Each structure stands twice: as C-alpha cells, then as structure tokens.
Amino acid sequence: MQSLGVFAFVLCIVAGCHGNTFKLGACPRVVVMNNLDFDQFLGEWYVVQRFNPMATCTKILYNKTSDDSYTISEKSRPLGLNFNFHYQFIKPRHLNFLRNDTTSIFRAERDIAHFTLSTFGVIDTDYNNYAVVWGCDPVLFGSIQNVDILSRTPTPQTNLIKSVKETLKNLSIDYHPMDNVDQTRCEDSNSNSDGSSTDGDRNTNNIIAG
C-alpha cells in the first residue's frame, strides 16, 4: 500500500496537481447536460471550488475565436501566493466537441507544459450564475479527475455549493476532495504580465449526455 501511495503521489506531480485527483479505476459514468448552448456558456468564470486546489484567484475563460472555433484558458496564482505575485497563465487550448448531438462533452488540446486535464463534461449550468464542470482522463490503471464549481462572480450564492454537492452525490461522484478556491485580494486585470490580452474522433471516457 505504501508503494501505491508513492505512485499516486508521483502521478499527482506528473499531472501538475492543478486541482486534480488521482483515483484507481476507470473514469466513472457521469450524466451531463443534454442540450448545452455553448455560446451562452462562453465568457469568464470564477472557480470557487475544485478538487485539491493548489492556487488562488483561479479564473477560466471560454472564448470563441474569429474562425468560429472555441478555446479554453485559465489563470491563477499558484500555491496561494496572493501578494505581489504574477498570475500563471495557461495558454488558450482549442476545444473539440466529442459528440455530434451535444456540446456538453468536449476535449481540449493537450498542454504538455502544464499536464492539465483534456476531457470535460458540463453537468449543469444556468449560464448567468453558476456551472458545474466534470473532467476525467484515464492514466495507466487509474484516472485523473476533477470537478469545478464555477460562478460568474467571486462570491456565489450561499446555497450553491450545497446544491451542487447534492447533485454530485446523486451522480456517485466523490466530492470530498473539493475545497474552496480563494478569490479574495485578487487584482482585476484583463491582461497578461507581458501586456497581452487574455481573451483570447474520440473516447469520451464514460461521460454521457443525459
């Protein structure tokens, strides 16, 4: 068991630990939204909870480019260093939808520099206030998993977290690795440290449309 724990720790390092959790076994079957309007889903989201967060001030931007393709990018302050510390930016990654009948299941191009998750499903959203995004990629005899609770504002509605966790429980998703992402003392900036703007088929890993 000790060697297994060491292996899991090494996988965590390899996976970048960007709010991810290693679990034994395949990705669980997760029912996502059947009809997601991805254009309404676009824009900036605050990550208010995720698995084992290793950063603060985390935001995710879903964007539509001039050629009508979609991208995802993320910025945060790693290791909770909120004071006088530059944001870490994960460059925009192009998205591909994995099912012709839904835009709820999508895969982002790999970012080897950050070893981030690539396959996602939107479990629930009302577009204007909150969203729940599930991610899972198989690795060896296990999987790297994550759930993001997203909000359009840094401080979500008080009953949101409780409601989302009840939904996750009903889907048999272990939400215990989830923790708050600190969104306080975060500078409001729309540009990278270099001054540039931040705006910027396949196995679905058992993520299914409901």
Image: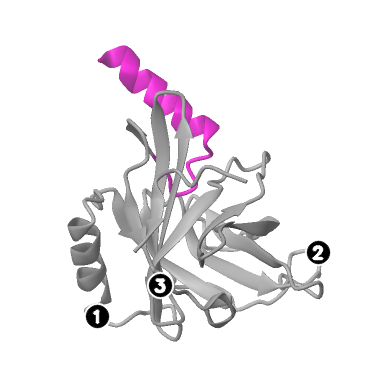
Q: Position of residue 8 (x, y in %)?
A: 38, 26
- Dot 2 amino acid type: Asp
According to the image, label 2 marks what residue?
194
Q: Position of residue 27 (x, y in %)?
A: 37, 40
Indicate the secondary structure of the residue bearing disc 3: strand
- Dot 1 amino acid type: Thr
In terms of secondary structure, what is the magenta stretch mainly?
Answer: helix
Closer to the camera in the image, 38 or 101 = 101
> How is the rendered protein coloured?
one colour
Indicate the secondary structure of the residue bearing disc 1: loop
Indicate the secondary structure of the residue bearing disc 2: loop
| Image point (18%, 65%), residue name | 166
Q: Earlier in the sequence, mark 2 or mark 3?
A: 3
| Residue reaching furthest to the bottom | 128
| Circle 1 or circle 3, nearest the eye | 3
| Image point (55%, 75%), residue name | 38
Is residue 177 shown in magenta? no
What are the residue bounds of the magenta stretch? 1-21
Label 1: how many residues lie within 10 Å, few (<14), some (14-19) or many (20+)? few
According to the image, label 1 marks what residue?
158
| Residue 182 visible at all | no
- Dot 3 amino acid type: Ala
**Mark identifier at residue 131:** 3
| Image point (40%, 83%), residue name | 129
| Residue 95 visible at all | yes
Left or right: residue 69 compared with residue 153? right
- Alpha carbon separation for disc pair 2 and 3: 30 Å
